Amino acid sequence: MPLTLRFVLLALIFVAIALVVQSDRRRLGVFVNGYRRGKTRLVALPMLALILLLYAASCYSALDRGQPMISLALAAASFVIGYIGSMIWQRVFVRELGA
């Protein structure tokens, strides 16, 4: 992808994050940061490290090795890790609340 399009996509991602925060505050009255103190951080940080590792491998394979299809596979893996990790994070958070 051209560099300009990458920056446009990055800006759209930041807008999407702001919209999620706004939506949560409107629906639930609160937005809970994923990196909050407690046991949830023990879920969030390893998940972040793993996704960043996949991102670095994706950049290497696409930019240095010229294999963009590997990037797509790693993006799919990152999505699955993020989805499963968010479910685990939510279970830990609910358990911390004592529910």
Image (cartoon, grey):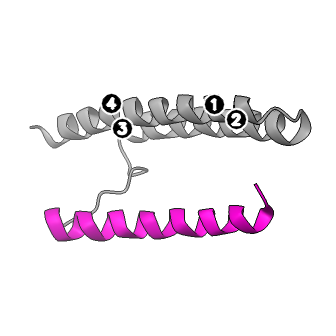
Residue on which the image places disc 1: 74
Q: CA distance from mark 4 to mark 1?
A: 21 Å
Residue on which the image places disc 2: 71
| Kind of residue at badge 2 | Ser
Residue 49 screen position, x and y as percent: 60, 36
In terms of depth relative to the viewer, which is nearer, 34 or 26? 26
In the picture provided, is 71 more to the left or to the right than 83?
A: right
Residue on which the image places disc 4: 88
| Kind of residue at badge 4 | Ile
Mark toward the start of the polypeptide (3 vs 2) = 2
Identify the mark at residue 86; answer none if there is no mark.
3
For the residue carrying disc 3, how many other residues have a C-alpha within 10 Å: few (<14), some (14-19), or many (20+)? Answer: some
| Kind of residue at badge 1 | Leu
* CB under 8 Å between discs 2 and 1: yes
In terms of depth relative to the viewer, which is nearer, 91 or 71? 71
In the picture provided, is 77 more to the left or to the right than 92?
A: right
* CB under 8 Å between discs 3 and 2: no
Which corner quadrant holds the N terminus?
bottom right
Q: Specify the principal SS of the magenta part.
A: helix
Displayed quadrant of residue 54: top right
| Kind of residue at badge 3 | Ser
